[in-house]
Amino acid sequence: MRLAFLLYKYFPYGGMQRDFLQFVQALQGRGHEARVYCFTWQGEHAPHIDLRLVPQVSGSSRRRGERYLQWVSKDLSADPVDGVVGFNKMPGLDVYFAADPCYLAKAMNDRGRLYRRGGRFRHFAAYERAVFDPASATRILLISATEQRKFERYYHTPPDRMHLLPPGVSASSRRPPDAARRRAAVRGDLQVRSGELVLLFVGSGYITKGLDRAIRSLASVRAAQPQQAVRLLVVGQDKGRRFARLGRKLGVSECLHFLGGRDDVPDLMLAADLLVHPALTEAAGIVLLEALVAGLPVVVTDVCGYAHHIAAAGAGIVLPSPFSQSLLDKAVLRNIDGVYRAECRHSALQYAATADLYSMHSAGARLIENIIAAKLGGAGA
């Protein structure tokens, strides 16, 4: 089959973007052709993909979204495909991969009435409704049962159009036999002192992922345990100026390190002592499971779709809502105890050996194939 994949922007360090590429490759492996529409593609060009860059326009995100849909719709009319798979919400999709949380739930609960009168709200709510409305034909691949309940509540989407996928951690993220050697090598490269506590933050959306909260916890550790050497490694592709200012204000600049987007996150997880992920919102959070299968303890907010795996595995601490900075600070301080961290690591690795945390992309590819085959009137694979 000829399949079109719709994504506004591709860059190699986003969780959704990585899922997108793995779905494309899984479907290519099953013999299907892949055409990709996006505004920008950062990083190495993926092989055997028909990449069509949509001309960008200036202005609001609403205007860019409308322009994207107009251009793609025109191109698909001139050069049709068998099925359209979207990774951003918009009209006209056969399949949508729900990596983003429910927009309407956030707008109703976290925004005021004035915001909901604006054009931005009308645009994003309409594009989300085009996917989840009961009258829509779009089939939805979900990664979070929590978000599924939100979509059902706000749109009454028929259950037979929604498919909850297992997680999709790469097997390469699992803790390797030479983990101790690699940990020592990376800590040496980073000039980590003996006994120093290394906190790791991973995420390309610093605001949404709660980097300010993590920096405040770094300052709390310094204040509560002045004799404890500690640093926070920040990994992700985003603008860090305001967060660097916060670090200076709190007096922790010298132990706050911005590493940018990295390809060696699995090694950084082996080198770190704790993943701090105090997100404000997160549909899933694949980084949580990458830490879990690497045996890295986690502190995470319960708003994250995959936080329940951390609790079930005994792999760290899940913070309840509403968020409390003091509870986050206490949770980070708890992880100064090396015995506690070792217990979390042992429990996490046991869970990683038995739970299905790995099959999202193969299972999702089969579903996409069957959905498009049914649309075309053929039999599913």
Image (cartoon, rainbow, N blue to C red):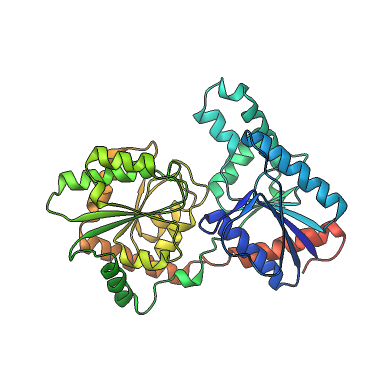
Residue at image location 63% in from the left, 64% down from the top:
45
Q: Is residue 336 above or below residue 107?
A: below
State which quadrant residue 377 falls in: bottom right
Residue at image location 53% in from the left, 55% down from the top:
15
Residue in front for this viewpoint, 43 or 326: 43
Residue at image location 67% in from the left, 32% down from the top:
123
Tell whether 146 sits left or right of 322: right
Q: Position of residue 26 (x, y in %)?
A: 66, 68
| Residue 92 visible in the displayed image | no
Q: Position of residue 81 (x, y in %)?
A: 82, 58
Which quadrant is home to the N terminus?
bottom right
| Residue 287 visible in the displayed image | yes
Question: How many numbered callouts?
Answer: 0
Residue in front for this viewpoint, 374 or 128: 128
Which quadrant is home to the C terminus?
bottom right
Work out which residue is located at the far left of the displayed protein and give it: 227
Q: Position of residue 236 (x, y in %)?
A: 44, 53
Work out which residue is located at the far bottom of the displayed protein and give it: 177
Residue in front for this viewpoint, 208 or 8: 8
Tell whether 201 sits left or right of 53: left
Q: Is residue 132 above or below residue 277?
A: above
